[in-house]
Image: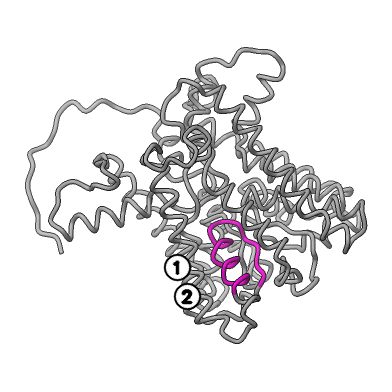
């Protein structure tokens, strides 16, 4: 018990989990004070807690309209939670340690390695500097590109704040917006604006690729052959998960729109379900087939070591490659002239099964508790588990227990399946022997 309650005995995975709980506790307290709401009365505990979990886990699901319910101070707190949650609490803590001139110890370096999905411990400080420069640089460029539009519509002071807020929210794949009910909510008022659409999409993809992927691109430029295997997989999967859903949405869901608007809407709605949470079309108007596409994209998510959630593109690729190898009667899983390690395949299967159990279990529970159709529940639960934030308007209508279930899904989706598993098993026990092997028939 003493080891559990003493931080210096925590493993890196436990440090990551507890740091997020600390951020959630602080954010909840700040959002409950009177100055955080537009009416000056302070938010109820569940509202503050749900919003804090959603922001710190960069999800975007809300029980109150962000642009209407929260004051400027409350919106600033939400933006702070989004930024910290996107980069990771551990990343920001180590950044403050560096800024104070103190030395980063081995424990902090090890925790950083796990938080950022860095393959080796060496060079952590150099990678951290790159991440901070890249993050704030991309967010600044995004804000500058959005400023002309928002300043035109809201004036300079409010327009600058809107541009900064949405740039950070998009890069961190959070999906929070300040547009209130204008145009139907989210970014629907700018569905036909190429500048807003392309800027937000670029920010979402940039945040979802992963910091280590960008470091690889920075070092090797356009030389695809020189990239690490993980980078090749991430780029391939990202391209497929944008082009294929966009084509389906273009021909199936948006056939009645003008051509130019159809292109923008289909591309945007193919990019944003992979954990961003913005929308330029009415999600409630989608057919059940269209909603199923969103569910698949939301559960897949972004890439390891990024601001995105979901099972991750590398996990989906590993499962598909393993299935393909099995169909071809191959023992090894090979791709891009490399062989995937058996433990990678085992981890991918574990992650997928955990997400599948949480997704199906929470969907069933909310269906029973709130008497909601299954497909609608699937959209909400996959949105929470994938830290997306897309909603068909159910979140604020759910009961308290269902909202707490969504909070649990958001936390699990942001921290990650493997981190949660390793946090619960801080000390790996050495295997003293192996049981006799016996084959069974499957399939």
At horizontal 69% and vertical 51% (from top left) the residue drawn is 169
Using the image as rendered, state which of residue 25 and residue 170 is in the foreground.
170
Q: Is residue 268 above or below residue 52?
A: below
Is 94 left or right of 326, judged from the image as shown? right
**Residue at the disc numbered 1:** 244
Using the image as rendered, state which of residue 106 and residue 304 is in the foreground.
304
Q: Is residue 419 above or below residue 172?
A: above
At horizontal 65% and vertical 36% (from top left) the residue drawn is 22
Q: How busy is the neighbourhood of tag 1: few (under 14 within 10 Å), some, or many (20 plus)?
A: few
At horizontal 41% and vertical 40% (from top left) the residue drawn is 421
Is 379 left or right of 165, judged from the image as shown? left
Image coloring type? one colour
> Is the C-beta separation of discs 1 and 2 under 8 Å?
yes
Q: Which residues are magenta?
A: 263-280
Q: Is residue 194 above or below residue 216?
A: below
* Quadrant of the image occupied by residue 419: top left
Tell me, for residue 248, which label it has, or none. Answer: 2
Looking at the rendered structure, the secondary structure element under dot 2 is: helix
């Amino acid at each position: 018990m003493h080891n559990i309650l003493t931080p210096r005995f925590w493993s890196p995975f436990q440090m990551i989990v507890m740091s997020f709980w600390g951020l959630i506790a602080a954010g909840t307290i700040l959002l409950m004070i009177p100055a955080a709401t537009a009416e000056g009365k302070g938010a109820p505990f569940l509202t503050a807690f749900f919003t804090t979990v959603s922001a710190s886990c960069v999800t975007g699901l809300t029980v109150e309209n962000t642009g209407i319910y929260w004051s400027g101070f409350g919106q600033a707190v939400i933006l702070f939670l989004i930024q910290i949650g996107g980069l990771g609490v551990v990343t920001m803590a180590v950044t403050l340690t560096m800024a104070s001139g103190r030395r980063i110890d081995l424990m902090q370096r090890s925790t950083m390695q796990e938080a950022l999905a860095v393959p080796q411990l060496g060079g952590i400080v150099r990678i951290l500097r790159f991440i901070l420069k890249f993050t704030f640089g991309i967010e600044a460029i995004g804000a500058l590109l959005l400023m002309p539009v928002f300043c035109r519509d809201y004036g300079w002071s409010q327009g600058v704040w809107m541009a900064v807020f949405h740039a950070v929210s998009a890069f961190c794949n959070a999906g929070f917006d300040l547009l209130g009910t204008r145009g139907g909510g989210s970014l629907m008022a700018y569905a036909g604006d190429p500048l807003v659409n392309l800027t937000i999409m670029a920010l979402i993809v940039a945040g979802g690729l992963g910091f280590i992927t960008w470091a690889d691109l920075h070092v090797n430029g356009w030389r695809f052959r020189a990239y690490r295997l993980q980078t090749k997989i991430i780029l391939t999967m990202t391209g497929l998960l944008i082009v294929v859903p966009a084509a389906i949405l273009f021909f199936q869901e948006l056939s009645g729109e003008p051509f130019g608007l159809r292109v923008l809407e289909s591309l945007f709605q193919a990019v944003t379900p992979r954990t961003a949470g913005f929308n330029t079309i009415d999600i409630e108007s989608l057919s059940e087939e269209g909603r199923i596409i969103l569910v698949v994209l939301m559960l897949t998510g972004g890439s390891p070591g990024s601001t995105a959630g979901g099972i991750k593109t590398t996990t989906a690729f590993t499962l598909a490659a393993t299935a393909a190898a099995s169909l071809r009667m191959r023992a090894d899983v090979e791709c891009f002239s490399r062989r995937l390690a058996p433990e990678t395949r085992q981890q991918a299967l574990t992650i997928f099964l955990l997400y599948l159990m949480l997704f199906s279990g929470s969907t069933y529970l909310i269906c029973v508790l709130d008497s909601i159709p299954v497909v609608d529940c699937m959209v909400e639960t996959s949105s929470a588990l994938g830290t997306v934030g897309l909603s068909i308007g159910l979140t604020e209508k759910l009961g308290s227990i269902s909202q707490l279930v969504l909070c649990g899904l958001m936390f699990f989706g942001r921290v990650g399946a493997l981190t949660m598993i390793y946090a619960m098993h801080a000390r790996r026990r050495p295997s003293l022997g192996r049981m006799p092997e016996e084959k069974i028939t499957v399939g």
